[in-house]
Amino acid sequence: MTITDKSGVPETSPPGTRPPVAPGGSALRKLLLRLHFYAGVFVGPFLLVAALTGFVYAFAPTLEKLVYGNYLDARSTGEPLPASEQLQAALDGRDPAAVESLQTADPGGTTRVVFTDPDAASGQSTVFVDPGSGDVLGALETDSGDLPLRAWLSALHKNLHLGDVGNLYSEMAASWLFVIVLGGLYLWWDKSRKDRARGGRARLLTVDRSVAGRRRTLNWHGAVGAWAALGLLFLSATGLSWSDHAGANIKTLRAEMSWNAPKLNASLDGTPAPAGGDHDGHGGGGGATASTAEAVDVTAIDGVLHVARAQGLTGQLSVGVPATVAEAWTVKETAKTGGDAIAVDGYTMRVTDRVDFADVPLVAKLTSWGIALHMGTMFGLANQVVLAALAVALLTMIVRGYLMWWQRRPARAQGVEFGTVPRRGALRRLPWPAIAAIAVVAGAVGMFVPLLGISLAAFLVVDVAIGFVSRSRAKTLEKKETPA
């Protein structure tokens, strides 16, 4: 297999001279074309895997309902039993101290009680209770609340079940996706502009079906990319926010700019307990301070939920059970568009802290919404269909990108020989201020998105090495052809 430069050999200039400065637009286009090409060729496999696994993961919420319907769908239609009774049913001999949280049931759904489970690989299991009858419908090992299927698909999409090493694949894909999309948009717009200047029809969102071969492939590649660009940029941004290296930089930036959502304070150090430790009153006044060694009374959940409803929390609620009586119960709305949260003293039923989603910084809200959209949970099936469509669009562009490369191979190519690559030397033909600006921007972005910076540096090293070898071969050939 061979890969050749568009000109067959690289352009050279006399020793010690710099190639003539080309018009900015032309040189920039050639530079972006070469970058877009190499990024597509070498990062394409990462994006291909991400698109395939992302297509399946997009439908995880719907697949869960199909696979786990016997756990998720309530069989009774009566009024829900008190949460404490449902919790007692879920315990069924389990240690009350192992209860982590309880999630109230949606209409027609089941109540979920999450336990710490040392026998589970994830360290957690969830019991599903019919809220109307109190019947336990079963238990599943869960991971941070995710059911087994979603947890498996999530790990497949994130790291191919290869752990920390596998995380590099998804971060590499997310790191380069926005570069490829933005570069491709510019190239497609520039082609449309030139077509208009030549008196032709400018096409950005449609395919010219009057052409064939590589030009038809390019039309499909560009038009699909233009339609999917915003969605792919969104997936790149949200994907990076979850990554190991760029994600750490994003978290640091958000912390420094005070863009994080305030955390609910669940500490109750020094909170007085009612006399006699009467938990049933849920509103008693003074008394002795609760001992941190005292077990938490999980039946206090009814009073906690009553306080939460009185405080205006609506819909499905997630109730966090404290590990000790020195901590407050937490109640959070699970609405996908964001919810309020409160901390409640389980002895006095006093609200000790509150975080309203309306007061959360805009960036934190956007992050929360972005996560829900990326996971396909914000708008149900419609959200999942859009994600799947973006995955298909990305797959289409990757396949057509490789096809264009194949279609550019020499007419008399034999065997496995791909097409030529965009000509080298575009960067050296830009004005010095433009080169300096590109270097500064590339360096800054590369430091913030480390895998992008490292791989871009590797591309440059390889490209320089290829250029050196090509020039050496050209000089050797020239010497052989020059008469003695």
Image: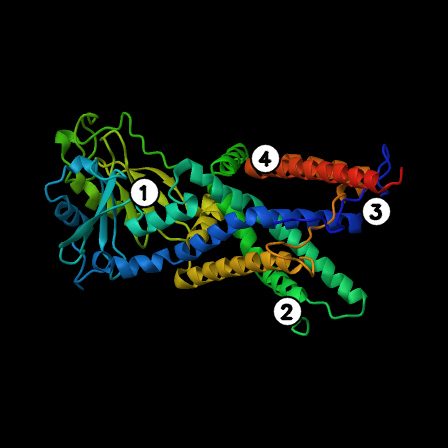
Query: Is residue 263 toward the left or the right of residue 140 in the image?
Result: right
Callout 3 crowding tier (Cα within 10 Å): few <14, some 14–19, many ≥20:
some
Residue on which disc 3 sits: 22
Residue on which disc 1 sits: 144
Q: Position of residue 431 (x, y in %)?
A: 82, 41
Front one among 142 and 363 = 142
Q: Which mark is residue 206?
A: 2
Q: Which mark is residue 342?
A: none
In this rendering, which labeled residue sits more in front, label 2 or label 3? Answer: 3
> Relative to residue 481, is residue 291 depicted above or below?
above
Q: Which quadrant holds residue 278?
A: top left
Q: Give the mark, 2 or 3, whose residue is nearer the N terminus.
A: 3
Residue for point 65% across, 73% down: 209
Amino acid type, residue under disc 3 in the picture: Ala
Q: Give the mark, 4 or 2, whose residue is nearer the N terminus.
A: 2
Amino acid type, residue under disc 2 in the picture: Thr
Q: Position of residue 111 (x, y in %)?
A: 22, 52
Residue on which disc 4 sits: 454
Residue for point 50% across, 42% down: 171
Q: Give the mark, 1 or 3, whose residue is nearer the N terminus.
A: 3
Callout 4 crowding tier (Cα within 10 Å): few <14, some 14–19, many ≥20:
few
Quadrant where the image shows the C terminus: top right
> Relative to residue 48, is residue 258 depicted above or below?
above
Structural distance between the alpha carbons of marks 1 and 2: 44 Å
Q: Is residue 333 visible?
A: no
Q: Position of residue 377 (x, y in %)?
A: 39, 55
